[in-house]
Image (spheres, grey):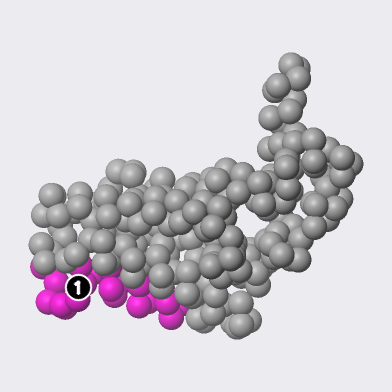
Amino acid sequence: MKQDEKSKLTQKTIAERAFRVIYRQGYYRTTPSAIMAETGLSKGAFYHHFENKQVLTKKMISEVLHERIYMNMIRPLYGEGEALELLENTFSARLLHFSAEEKRLGCPLNNLINEVAGENEPLQSALKEIITEWRAAIIHVLQRGLREGSVRPDIHAESVATFLVSSFEGVRGLRKLDTDDQLFGQYTDSLRFFIRSLRKHSDYNAF
């Protein structure tokens, strides 16, 4: 393996392990030593590949965390299928597949937003890019539904996208305080009701 390829592989490994540690401990409580203990590599390897923890965390957000959100919440919305069914299935299906640890720890994206907001512009920008891409995917599927005639013409796609992202992140946060999945069930019921209200022939008025 060429040195450049080996270096990229090592950086990827460190970023993946950093995600695990930061997800469990939080950004500010995580040290480079804790991250490297997870990798089994020396602390010197950390500083050989990354200037500091902030640089590593930005890479982790842009690659590891982005991939997680993209695969589960963004890519499915560009798939085939009726627009509102695709939207409903993407959000509700994700709630069904969280592990016990993911329920306990909440959303890593939202955790980082709450932790670094107003204090760390480089990390804020990287997190905002994920949210922007996620909202764009929701807007895309809604606009497709509008063109196909399945979505009510009076809805505001950008507002719906903001509501869906905010409510999903909100219930992930609330679940950290609750040991009962009933909360997810209540959210899913309301989510389905709301999304179905966006259908062109619905009598329910929202947005």
Q: In the current view of this chain or complex, which residue is farthest to the top?
A: 2
Q: Which residue is found at the position 71% from the left and 65% from the top?
A: 28
Q: Secondary structure at mark 1?
A: loop
Occupied quadrant, residue 27: bottom right
Question: In this picture, is 5 found above or below 118?
Answer: above
Q: Quadrant of the N terminus?
A: top right
* Mark 1 residue type: Phe
Q: Quadrant of the C terminus?
A: bottom left
Q: Pinpoint residue 39: horizontal percent, then vertical percent.
A: 82, 45
Q: Nearer the viewer, residue 130 or 125?
A: 125
Find out whether residue 85 is within the magenta segment. no
Q: Pinpoint residue 117: horizontal percent, then vertical percent.
A: 54, 67
Q: Pinpoint residue 181: horizontal percent, then vertical percent.
A: 55, 78
Q: Report the magenta residues as a range.
A: 185-207
Q: Nearer the viewer, residue 154 or 54?
A: 54
Q: Which residue is found at the position 35% from the left and 77% from the top?
A: 190
Residue to which mark 1 is pinned: 207
